[in-house]
Image: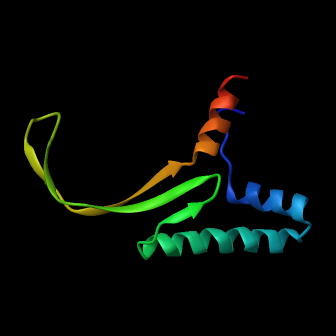
Amino acid sequence: MAGETLTRMDLAEAVFEQVGLSRNESADLVESVLQHISDSLVRGENVKISSFGTFNIRDKNSRVGRNPKTGEEVVINPRRVLSFRPSLTMKDRVAAGNKK
């Protein structure tokens, strides 16, 4: 399973199989949840999913960086970045998966 990617369709298929909604309803549900999460992040809100993790938006100030190839100093513009911090439960599950 290493190297595989979980897609929206995979999530919709899991909802279809486990919840019993139609395939179209399952796809709409997954899309709705992802859209709600995205909209909250765009508004600058944190998104916390219990036993999974927290998505945070951080504002970074401008700073001076250096081009590693030429050594030339370059101004890096201020920006917003998305970060994810997994919960302890998720960290433990991932660590347990590494032992197999």
The residue lying toward the viewer, choosing from 14 and 7, is 14
Q: Residue at x 86, y 63 (%)?
A: 16
Q: Which quadrant is the C terminus positioned in? A: top right
Taking the image as drawn, is residue 3 in sight? no
Q: Position of residue 32 (x, y in %)?
A: 67, 75
**What is the count of numbered marks?**
0
Q: Residue at x 7, y 41 (%)?
A: 72
Q: Which quadrant is the N terminus positioned in? A: top right
Q: Position of residue 94 (x, y in %)?
A: 64, 36
Residue furthest to the left: 72
Taking the image as drawn, is residue 32 in sight? yes
Q: How is the image coloured?
A: rainbow
Task: Specify the quadrant of the image occupied by residue 58.
Answer: bottom left
Instruction: Decide: is 76 above or below 32.
Output: above
Q: Position of residue 84 (x, y in %)?
A: 48, 52
Instruction: Decide: is 37 above or below 52.
Output: below
Q: Position of residue 20 (x, y in %)?
A: 92, 66
The residue lying toward the viewer, choosing from 39 and 53, is 53
Residue furthest to the top: 99
Task: Specify the quadrant of the image occupied by residue 66.
Answer: top left
Q: Residue at x 45, y 71 (%)?
A: 45
